[in-house]
Image: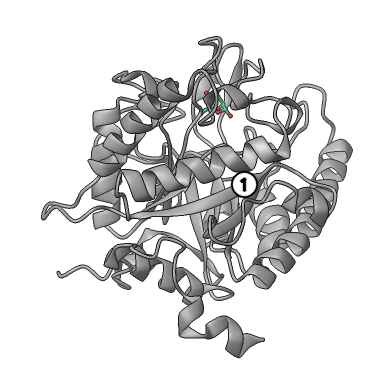
Amino acid sequence: MLLFACNRDELRPIDTKATREARSLYTLLHRLKGDKILFGHQDDLAYGVHWRYQPGKSDVKDVAGDYPAVMGWDIGRIEHGRETNLDAVPFDLMRQFIVSSARAGSINTISWHLDNPVTGGNSWDTTAAVAHILPSGRLHSQFVAWLDRVAAFLESLRFEDGTPVPVLFRPFHELNGDWFWWCKPFCSKEEYIALWRFTVDYLKDTKGLHHLLYVYNTNNFKHEDEFMERYPGDKYVDMMSFDTYQHLNVNTMSSTSLETSSQKFKAHLKSNLTVLQQCATRHGKLMALAETGFETIPHKAWWTEVLYDAIQSYDLSYVLVWRNQGMLKDKMHYYAPYPGHVSATDFTKMFKGTKMTLQGTLRSMNIYDLPN
Ligand code: BMA
């Protein structure tokens, strides 16, 4: 089994014309399986709990001494040609962050909270829309125009010499949830798969983008059938992943309820990871915990005792925690610690003598096989 998984022919992205840099990244991620788990953070370089747009700043670096190995970004609103995304991050800055962090050794992943093409509402407007944007649908040309804008942004991500920066692209995420218009209750399995395949074929074959690796993503699931139900096929996916968060009302929690919640979350994480690993192994795909976290991290030892303890024995390429917005409406919304945070010491401990990896380790590996 191991030999088969390491067969050279297996180590190729789905895009047969993938760039040398994307192939290098893909191969490296396969090699690192079981050895390293890369730590990721959404919008890490753009803002943190107590700051906004300060060059070089990062909450993760301020606490752990180094930048995340994986940088997450979201291009929601690019479809309208807007200058900023749904969380007010300017696309010009995002591009700079992506290029400079890749130069420094990190891997970038992009999700897309695209608006509802039927109503003009946001991603959370669940009015049925998928059938309308497929090739036979009345809004297909509008969707193609949206993809053209996505492609233009992705295409603009280039190192100084013009080489495209490889990206892990994770569209139509959390597909089995019930909150986005592309989720399970609002389109059929066939429609979802057709949307996925059209998008991949369009970016790859029509737009000629060959620096992308494609990430399939669900939310929590009960069993393998649910995880794989809308899988678009081995020719359309490079990496399998899911998202899961620990939830607890911090205003009413007690130390007992916190402990119970963390134990339950850990058990749940392990059971979903076991299924993910079986599927990824069987299909020869990479795997990731594409989004996770515990809002405001009220559990002091959450990083080592809950997160790392749950994930350490799985072949995850990366784990990414969501964004450090700070105040959002009437409450705090952040998933990585900042200096002085109750979990800061434990966060730092998670990187000491473990598989958990920050940017510096990747830098020395020249993951994109770039000339120096
Ligand atoms: C959600 C929240 C929202 C945000 C969205 C896209 O989980 O963080 O505030 O707009 O992700 O980043």
Q: Residue at x 75, y 44 (%)?
A: 220
Q: Residue at x 40, y 29 (%)?
A: 144
Quadrant location of ligand 1?
A: top right
20 or 135: nearer the viewer: 135
Q: Quadrant of residue 310?
A: bottom right
Where the C terminus falls, by quadrant? Answer: bottom left
Q: Amino acid at mark 1?
A: Asn
Q: State whether residue 206 is above or below residue 5.
A: above
Q: Where residue 159 appears, x then y in whole percent? A: 18, 52
111 or 265: nearer the viewer: 111
Does residue 297 appear in this view? no
Question: What is the image's colouring?
Answer: one colour
Where the N terminus falls, by quadrant? Answer: bottom right
The residue singled out by tag 1 in the image is 217
Q: Residue at x 35, y 39 (%)?
A: 45
Residue that lies at the very extreme toward the left in this rendered image: 161
Q: How many marks?
A: 1
Q: State whether residue 145 is above or below residue 229.
A: above
300 or 48: nearer the viewer: 48
Q: Residue at x 28, y 68 (%)?
A: 20
Q: Secondary structure at mark 1?
A: strand
Q: Where residue 130 appears, x then y in whole percent? A: 60, 27
Q: Is residue 272 left or right of residue 190?
A: right
Q: Where residue 293 appears, x then y in whole percent? A: 63, 42
Q: Is residue 7 left or right of residue 312?
A: left
